[in-house]
């Protein structure tokens, strides 16, 4: 019985960071959607149907026209994408701690926040260059803003804190 419990504990310990990263990406998507919805009243309706039916050159023309009539649209997208990544990285940094039995310490993990931030930056590139093309300069700025806000979330969530013994960790 103890062997099964030990194996189960190892499996749960291995799968937990992956599941937390998936949950963080889902949370980042929710925050991005909320921020997009906050900015929606200040913008003209987004031409989603036209973008879905157009080829790439048509998408570029549609987005150019949309950005000329709504100059705040790009800035609202930068804020929404960055804050989504911020929320995801903050969540996974705060919730993903590893206990090292050998040294009896609790240490923060960096791989989960890196996966969430990297995936979010990839999705920024995918969205900004293929789905709703806004140009390489705006895409680069979007990725930089996302990276900076992700790193800020990592710092604020305590990702750079030193490893502490289990007694220090629970004292606060």
Image (cartoon, grey):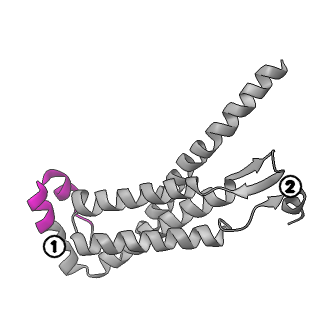
Residue 108 on the magenta segment: no
Image point (25%, 79%), residue name: 70
Q: Nearer the viewer, mark 1 or mark 2?
A: 2
Q: Residue furthest front?
A: 102
Position above or below: 48 against 12 = below
Q: CA distance from mark 1 to mark 2?
A: 55 Å
Secondary structure, mark 2, is helix
Residue at the spot x=64%, y=55% of the render? 109
Q: Residues within 10 Å of mark 1 (few under 14, many from 20)?
A: some
Q: Position of residue 55 (x, y in %)?
A: 11, 54
Depth order, front residue of 165/70: 165
Would residue 42 appear left or right of 115 to someone viewing this image? Answer: left
Within 10 Å of disc 2 (Cα), the crowding (few <14, some 14-19, many 20+) is: some
Residue 15, how many percent across, how many down? 62, 38
Residue 104 position within the rendered picture, expressed as x and y whole percent measured from the top left? 84, 50
Mark 1 or mark 2, earlier in chain: 1
Compared to 120, does 42 lie above or below? below
Q: Which residue is mark 1?
A: 64
| Residue at which label 2 appears | 166
Q: Which residues are magenta?
A: 46-61
In the rendered view, does 57 fall on the left or right side of 143?
left
Q: Give me the residue at 42% from left, 74% from top.
A: 145
Percent position (x, y) of residue 87?
A: 55, 64
Magenta span: chief secondary structure: helix
Inspect this view and state whether residue 156 appears.
yes
Judge from the rendering whether residue 115 lies leftward or rightward of residue 58; answer left or right.
Answer: right
């Amino acid at each position: 019985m103890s062997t099964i419990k030990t194996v189960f504990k190892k499996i749960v310990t291995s799968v937990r960071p992956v599941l937390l990263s998936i949950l963080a990406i889902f949370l980042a998507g929710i925050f991005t959607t909320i921020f997009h919805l906050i900015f929606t009243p200040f913008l003209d309706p987004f031409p989603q149907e036209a973008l879905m039916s157009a080829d790439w050159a048509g998408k570029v023309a549609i987005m150019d026209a949309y950005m000329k009539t709504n100059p705040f649209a790009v800035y609202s997208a930068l804020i929404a994408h960055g804050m989504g990544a911020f929320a995801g990285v903050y969540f996974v940094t705060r919730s993903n701690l590893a206990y090292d039995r050998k040294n009896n310490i609790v240490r923060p993990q960096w791989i989960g926040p890196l996966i969430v931030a990297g995936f979010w930056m990839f999705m920024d590139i995918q969205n900004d260059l293929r789905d709703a093309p806004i140009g390489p300069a705006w895409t680069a700025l979007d990725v930089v803003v996302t990276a900076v806000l992700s790193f800020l979330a990592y710092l604020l969530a305590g990702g750079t804190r030193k490893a502490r013994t289990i007694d220090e960790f629970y004292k606060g």
